[in-house]
């Protein structure tokens, strides 16, 4: 790549073909990711710049694994609509299976580029983090393109080393889309709920406070809005997100007691999947709650409904959890 040709297609196409076929982790980790980062670096001043097209191809590659990016049309049958995919993955080995070759290599390339350039990513490849791909999506799009974009940001966000870049993305690009994103979390399709929940949890793992400010209130309303005709889908979406958050519970210290209350409210739901997901999430959160006498305010809130902002009728099952918790 010391001397790039005028036409870049003969150079880019073999690289994209390699992404689809290279099954060796060693070659992918050493050579493939470096080849793409060099290509991005050497073409940053080209007019027209090929970065947007390259990134779009990498983004589309993320969708080549149905286990990692379940497709909405495959989960649209009536018996599947009430499923919580994160729960199914936790109960089987599906979540541990490796990604399809192309999706796996796309993840590696995207994360390597972000990590390599660090704060200089805005100079070398601004398209990667300035939301350019986001702007290409229509406002009310809830199809595969929008879900792939959520997958894309969920992949690169943990690899962005500059905190200011992350905060800028949240404020300028993600924040304005939160109403639409949370609306998708209430979707009747479990694949859409799953991918939205994973996106939110991936970003929350890195920037807990800015993200919780965006979605905690809407999440609370999803659980409390029992009068809504979409209440069942809302609680399914909330349970999916709570279960995803429970997998990063150690990163939520300081907010665990608050989030635990939401999981507790779902435990008594009549839907078996919701109960199971909420109970599993609650167990993960409880393990991290500080129970020293000087910090046992969470227990007092559970027993005293007047101290809780989220009021609900405690069921027998919930009382069992509280009593067991208190005994510990």
Image: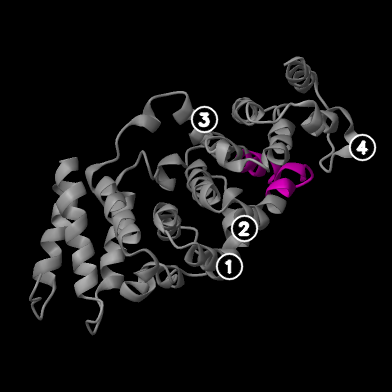
Q: Which residues are magenta?
A: 219-238
Relative to residue 113, is residue 33 drawn left or right?
A: left
Location of residue 206 in the rendering, given as x and y in whole percent from the top left corner: 51, 51
Counting residues from the start of the chain, the first of labels 3 and 4 encountered is: 3
Counting residues from the start of the chain, the first of labels 2 and 1 encountered is: 1
Residue wearing tag 4: 306
Relative to 126, residue 107 above or below: above
Q: Residue at x 49, y 48 (%)?
A: 202
Relative to residue 281, is residue 321 drawn left or right?
A: right
Q: Quadrant of the C terminus?
A: top right
Q: CB atoms at circles 2 and 3 under 8 Å apart? A: no
Relative to 89, residue 119 above or below: below
Counting residues from the start of the chain, the first of labels 4 and 2 encountered is: 2
Residue wearing tag 3: 87
Q: CB atoms at circles 2 and 1 under 8 Å apart? A: yes
Report, in whole angstroms, how far the alpha carbon at label 3 lies from the one at label 1.
31 Å
How crowded pointer 1 is (Cα within 10 Å; few <14, some 14-19, many 20+) is rated as some
Nearer the camera: disc 4 or disc 2: 2
Q: Residue at x 36, y 72 (%)?
A: 127
Report, in whole angstroms, how far the alpha carbon at label 4 lies from the one at label 2.
28 Å
Nearer the camera: disc 3 or disc 4: 4
Counting residues from the start of the chain, the first of labels 1 and 4 encountered is: 1
Residue 263 visible here: yes
Q: CB atoms at circles 3 and 4 under 8 Å apart? A: no
Label of residue 171 in the image = 1
Residue wearing tag 2: 210
Query: Quarter-wise, where is residue 26 in the image?
Result: top left
Residue 229 visible here: no
Report, in whole angstroms, how far the alpha carbon at label 2 lies from the one at label 1.
8 Å
């Amino acid at each position: 790549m010391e001397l790039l040709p005028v036409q870049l297609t003969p150079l880019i196409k073999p690289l994209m073909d390699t992404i689809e076929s290279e099954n060796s982790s060693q070659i992918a980790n050493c050579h493939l990711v470096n080849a793409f980062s060099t290509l991005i670096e050497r073409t940053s001043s080209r007019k027209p710049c090929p970065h947007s097209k390259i990134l779009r191809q990498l983004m589309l590659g993320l969708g080549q694994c149905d286990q990692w990016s379940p497709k909405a049309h495959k989960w649209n049958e009536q018996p599947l609509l009430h499923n919580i995919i994160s729960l199914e993955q936790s109960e089987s080995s599906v979540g541990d299976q490796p990604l399809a070759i192309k999706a796996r290599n796309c993840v590696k390339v995207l994360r390597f580029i972000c990590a390599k350039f660090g704060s200089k990513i805005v100079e070398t490849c601004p398209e990667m983090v300035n939301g350019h791909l986001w702007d290409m999506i229509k406002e009310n799009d809830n199809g595969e393109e929008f879900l792939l974009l959520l997958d894309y940001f969920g992949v690169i966000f943990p690899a962005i080393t500059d905190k200011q870049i992350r905060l800028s993305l949240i404020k300028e690009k993600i924040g304005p889309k939160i109403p639409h994103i949370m609306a998708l979390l209430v979707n009747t399709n479990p694949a859409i709920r799953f991918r939205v929940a994973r996106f939110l949890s991936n970003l929350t793992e890195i920037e807990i406070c800015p993200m919780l400010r965006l979605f905690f209130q809407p999440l609370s309303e999803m659980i409390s809005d029992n009068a809504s005709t979409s209440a069942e889908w809302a609680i399914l979406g909330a349970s999916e997100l709570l279960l995803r958050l429970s997998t990063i519970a150690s990163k939520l210290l300081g907010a665990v007691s608050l989030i635990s209350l939401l999981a507790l409210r779902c435990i008594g739901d009549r839907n078996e999947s919701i109960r199971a997901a909420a109970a599993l999430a609650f167990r993960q959160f409880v393990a991290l709650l500080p129970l020293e006498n000087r910090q046992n305010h969470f227990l007092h809130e559970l027993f005293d409904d007047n101290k809780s902002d989220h009021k609900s009728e405690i069921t027998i099952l919930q009382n069992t959890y509280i009593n067991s918790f208190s005994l510990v």
